[in-house]
Image (cartoon, helix red, strand yellow):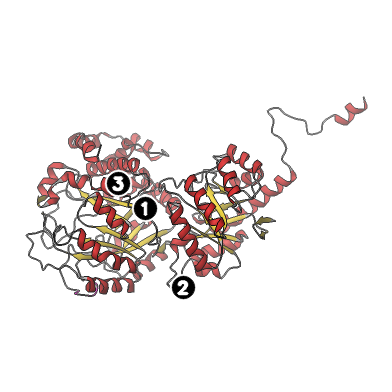
Amino acid sequence: MLHIANKSFSSRLLLGSGKFANPNLMQQAIQASGCQLVTLALKRLQLDQPRDDLLSPLREMNIQLLPNTSGAKTAKEAIFAAELAREALQTNWLKLEIHPDPRYLMPDPIETLLAAEQLVKLGFVVLPYCSADPVLCKRLEQAGCAAVMPLGAAIGSNQGLQTRAMLEVIIEQATVPVIIDAGLGAPSHAAAAMELGASAVLVNTAIATSQDPVGMASAFAQAVNAGRTAYNAGLAAAQPHAAASSPLTDFLAIL
Amino acid sequence: MSFSAHWQQQSWQELQLQSRNFSTAQVQTALHKPRLTLSDLQALLSPAALPLLPVLVAKAQQLTRQRFGHSVQFYAPLYLSNLCANECTYCGFSLSQKVKRRTLNSAEIEQECRAIKALGIDQVLLVTGEHERKVGIDYFCDVLPMIRHYFSSVQLEVQPLTTAEYARLKSLGVDAVMLYQETYNAAAYQQYHLKGKKSDIHWRLDAPDRVGLAGIDKIGLGILLGLSNWRTDAILLAKHLQYLQKQYWQCRFSLSVPRIRPCSGGNEVTNPISDKELIQLICAFRLFAPELEISLSTRESAEFRQHVVPLAITSVSAGSKTQPGGYSVEPENLEQFSIDDNRSPQQVAKALIEQGLQPVWKDWDSFLGR
């Protein structure tokens, strides 16, 4: 089970709700993934409309909504968005996203930490999207974040675990769940993240822009399970030389 | 150093000549690079790239889906005034044009806002002619708060302003400023822009710098296709984009590449661009700058938009009226140019959904970017 704040989830795969071709496909993909936590951008919601084409289909599903502050470039804007999201969606769960750089959508470590400190005080369950920086992750943890969400690679880049060495340090040191967010382009990337010991992964582009989002969502779910099972089982160490599958240990012992 | 200083060091003639010297091999190399240089973009814009257009289109489409998913944003222009102190030989709003002039007052603007909202539109582009004295910063500051109240995103396409004026507009709710250079060719620019402040090319070239300095979220660049050699204009626009992205790293950028449409002035297009070449231009920019928002307006036909939007376009206008009061106040003919896609926003949206795209009516909030 994945425990975040006071909730437990049997699925370790989180999904984003953007980029899908239509709301139906989004629903089906979420269903196929078994995911229980779905993030959605507050700025996309038409709260003055009776039926919003993003929110309404998500509300019909048995999932925890995780509103995000995408679009915010500063802590101030993110906090404002968080308050609006809490009121509109009746949840204090929040994916904190502050990326002032629209080209690579890199998270701003300074504004993110500032916002996280204040949002925690305001009673939010804060899950911050952040760079794969071990010190920053510890600082966010100390600020009271319920998890940290370091990036594997730039959002939507499908490049996989480019930050692997740093993620290993982050996972080793963390006392809150580490959710690898952004950059996971293939189920094998998600499996690799889980094998490293990540608590969960968040995927959007690779599923939503696949030729078959439902099939891909299912593939990611299987990969996340496989990676987690392998992590629990304990991965064998890699070494440069061959090692015999049936070693002579027993025989050597009796000599 | 402002952009116009960089621009002055460029030789239009040289850039235009370079375009003819690219080989198929150079185009192929550019097509398969993960990061393109300006020279790669030149290759993709060159005549040598035309035979490889299907490959270029496929790559552009893949990059667009990866970056923007299946989303296509919807907006509509709101023409506030057709008063203009400029004389531009291609424009129906020009000073000497005998058209009925009109500037909407607050009550009329509100009526138009309601009519646009009733179309389902939530993102608006405010457009005026260029009349500093009568439709200047004070007018914009007067009407903006009311307009802001109706829409999640407000963009502006008006005369170039000062940095301080842009800063004021930002605080009142402007999310984006469109500043189309029309052409980067100094000689041609002079030929087309005969009178008024618009004839000062430097003031216009440096306007995106001023928007960036004011910290407005998005800057729209564009060239008016038909005025000069489009390949050379496109390369200079790319240089402009590259310069601005480095200077104003927190700004988003969008691209518009309108083709000259017939207007009441009745102009002849001296440098036409074919449908195929326009697709080449749009797709080449997608490879050069995958994050660039690219819009395609109702200047283009429904059929052309139907085919091109799914390739690399991220925002479309729909149901557009290009005259002040056109939606509700006075829906008669005073238009800046005639539009070619007369479908309603809902019709455009339905057609996109059938193509596997998702119309996005809202993607911003008024508290962002302040």
Q: Amino acid at mark 3?
A: Leu
Q: Are marks 1 and 2 on the same chain?
A: no
- Residue stretch rendered in magenta on the structure: B326-330
Q: Which quarter of the figure is the N terminus of chain A placed in? A: bottom right
Residue A203, given in percent of the width and then of the height, sits at 55, 53
Alpha carbons under labels 1 and 2: distance apart? 29 Å
Residue A86, given in percent of the width and then of the height, sits at 52, 65
Q: Amino acid at mark 1?
A: Ala
Residue located 18% across and 46% down the image: B203
Query: Does the image show residue A15?
Result: no
Q: Which mark is residue B213?
A: 3
Residues at circles 3 and 2 in contact by the CB criterion of under 8 Å: no
B156 lies left or right of A63: left
Badge 3 element: helix
Q: Which residue is mark 1?
A: B312
User: Disc 2 sits on a residue from what chain?
Assistant: A
Mark 3 neighbour class, 10 Å CA radius: few under 14, some 14 to 19, many 20 or more = some
Whether residue A19 is situated above or below residue B110 in the rendered picture: above
Q: Which mark is residue A136?
A: none
User: Disc 3 sits on a residue from what chain?
Assistant: B
Residue B325, given in percent of the width and then of the height, sits at 21, 71
Please say whether residue A55 is one of the residues in the magenta stretch: no
Please tell me in which quadrant of the rendered image residue A61 appears.
bottom right
User: Disc 1 sits on a residue from what chain?
Assistant: B
Residue located 32% across and 57% down the image: B171
Q: Which residue is mark 2?
A: A51
Please tell me in which quadrant of the rendered image residue B367 appears.
bottom left
Badge 2 element: loop
Q: Earlier in the sequence, mark 1 or mark 3?
A: 3
Please say whether residue B328 is one of the residues in the magenta stretch: yes
Query: Does the image show residue B102?
Result: yes
Residues at circles 1 and 2 in contact by the CB criterion of under 8 Å: no
